Amino acid sequence: MNILIDHFTTNYNSAPFDLIQNKDFKPAILKLIEATKKEIDAIVTNTAQPTFENTIEALEFSGQQLDRVTSIFFNLNSAETNDEIQKIAQDISPILSEFGNDITLNNDLFKKVKHVFDNKDQLNLTTEQSTLLDKKYKSFSRNGANLPEDKKQELRAIDKQLASLKLKFGENILAETNAFEMLITNQEDLSGLPEGAIEAAKQLAESKNKEGWLITLDYPSYIPFMTYADNRALRKKLSLAFGAKGFNNNDYDNQKHVLKIAKLRHQRANLLGYKTHADFVLEERMAQTPEKVTSFLNELLEKAKPAAEREFTNLQNFAKELDGIDVLEKWDSAYYSEKLKQKLFNLDDEQLKPYFKLENVIEGAFLVANKLFGLQFKKIETIDKYHEDVMTFEVLDDNNNLVSLFYADFFPRPGKRNGAWMTSFKPQYIKDGVNQRPHISNVCNFTKPTKSKPSLLTFNEVTTLFHEFGHGLHGMLANTTYPSLSGTSVYWDFVELPSQILENWCYEKEALELFAKHYQTNEVIPMDLVNKIKESATFHEGMQTLRQISFGLLDMSWHGTDPSLIEDVKAYETKAFENTNLYPEVKSNCMSTAFAHIFQGGYSSGYYSYKWAEVLDADAFEYFKEEGIFNKEVAAKFKDHVLSQGGTENPMTLYKRFRGQEPKPEALLKRAGLIK
């Protein structure tokens, strides 16, 4: 018996992690593909006239167990992978890609969908039904349904290759991250490092039976070392290793994968009648065209670059005065920025960390969600977890109705990729009169507790937790009929609004006082520290903005042009960065070969959306500030018109319904200190 094949009989219909074995996945997925094919065949062979119900809705609700099992599998491949899971991923990804094409390239099915689409004006559909119909039609037309047979076969071959290449790209980065270790045996080399970072490094070394202190490329190890370690040579060594991931001319080299992915995406777009991959992607985004994205990024660049250059010159002068540094290098950036910040604001992360014990910050996020949206989070031990570090919660509304399950997974480990993300194990939807509630997960990589200290977060980690929790709320508060329009299933340049707006509460006295309490004394964070956090919020904002713009422009240069003649990844990247560079070029480093957002994740032609959504979030938070940051009416509007609506309508329509107007970019530029 394979636990994955049938409806789960667990509490809340949750993922039965304790019962799943890796070997169950492939046979279950193959069997569920066959079951889904039968559901598709039933739609195709139905002799009745195609209707919204027997075609579009039937298609929407087909393959639900397959979707659940694949989401569980690929979530594990990100958060708790191993060689066996990676091998299964390489086996099943091309099969799933092929099956996806079996559906979108099924001519008889497309004819039925097209029939409904062509007659939509007579159907009296709701707004959500119209959106679903439009989305289903486009999922065929934008993925080759109108192509002749030989071109359909070409498309299938490209999709199969892309599925494997993207997986391999991610596996290589994880392998390179895990392969690097810097063992420190001389205590003097730890000079400058905070006590907590030293203790964590000691504990990590002990866990691997090594004498000394172990530093790795995992963020909780890498970032404190780059920020505080006085030993410049060791910072350089660590920085070079971090910047060379996927660029070492070894078995894990990603250069050929970058070129192949970019070229295949371009071929695919051409095949479908689009000029570039970016033209294809952006047709279904708020920004709409590559030209609009590039002009948006360049306008921001024009505003940010003078500020960034001023900040860089100041930082350079500061490093020269302090330590006689003639040329400021990338491995000096975090170190001298932190020193300068301490000097200017008399503030450093080590002062703040005692007030940000992980458990208190989680509780703080829950309290903010309670004050805004009436949610309660109750820790439960009655559902399976995929790792002992994971915490599980029942999310209830004011009337004790189940809103969602919530999984929180906050510490790094060898089977988990770097970074932070939100995902789901089960979507929200309404079927047969039952509102199926979602199962949402936040995954991060924060510093683990040590023998003497709990997990204490840097302020940056606090905002990361709130950011991912904002995505989580978008998933939890979903309230739509159809799973493919639910929660975070929105235009990619709108998806960052709920996450980025929530970060704003981390800077507000009223919110900080709820959770920023000293882990030893329980003293609330002093007002002078709150003021310093606010004052320092725009510190080096020009340089930060320039960095984000540079990533957006690199993404657009890979995907908004014809990459077929590119042979040298590094040379091409260097050219893309020429207008945004501040630091001297490092020949042995390459960003593209580890740029998982665009080559493995879903951000290709979409990295600009972080800045795009910042315009929305700054404008939206202005509204909260005008009425009070915990104003129930504004929060209800945000929930009703943004968080609960998913992708049921055009995002600008939803935004204007909440805000009463289109967003004004001035709010962002003002908040960033780039205009007065």
Image (cartoon, helix red, strand yellow):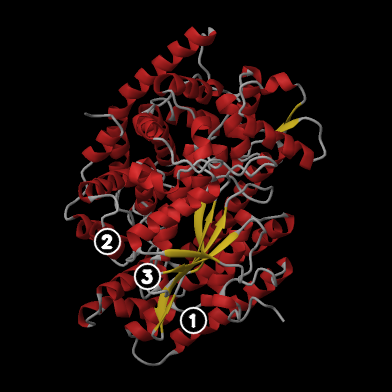
Coordinates of residue 37 in the picture (x, y in percent)? 54, 80
Residue that lies at the very extreme toward the left in this rendered image: 660
> As shown in the figure, which amino acid type bears the numbered disc 3?
Asp
Residue that lies at the very extreme toward the bottom in this rendered image: 47
Indicate which disc, 1 or 3, sits on the residue closer to the N terminus.
1
> As shown in the figure, which amino acid type bears the numbered disc 1?
Ile
Q: Is residue 617 left or right of residue 489?
A: left
The quadrant of the picture occupied by the C terminus is top left
Q: Quadrant of residue 127?
A: bottom left
Secondary element type, mark 2: loop
- Name the residue beneath numbered marker 2: 650
Secondary element type, mark 1: helix
- Name the residue beneath numbered marker 1: 40
Q: Is residue 466 left or right of residue 248?
A: left
Coordinates of residue 238 in the picture (x, y in percent)? 64, 28
Secondary element type, mark 3: loop
- Name the residue beneath numbered marker 3: 398
Q: Is residue 362 left or right of residue 23?
A: left
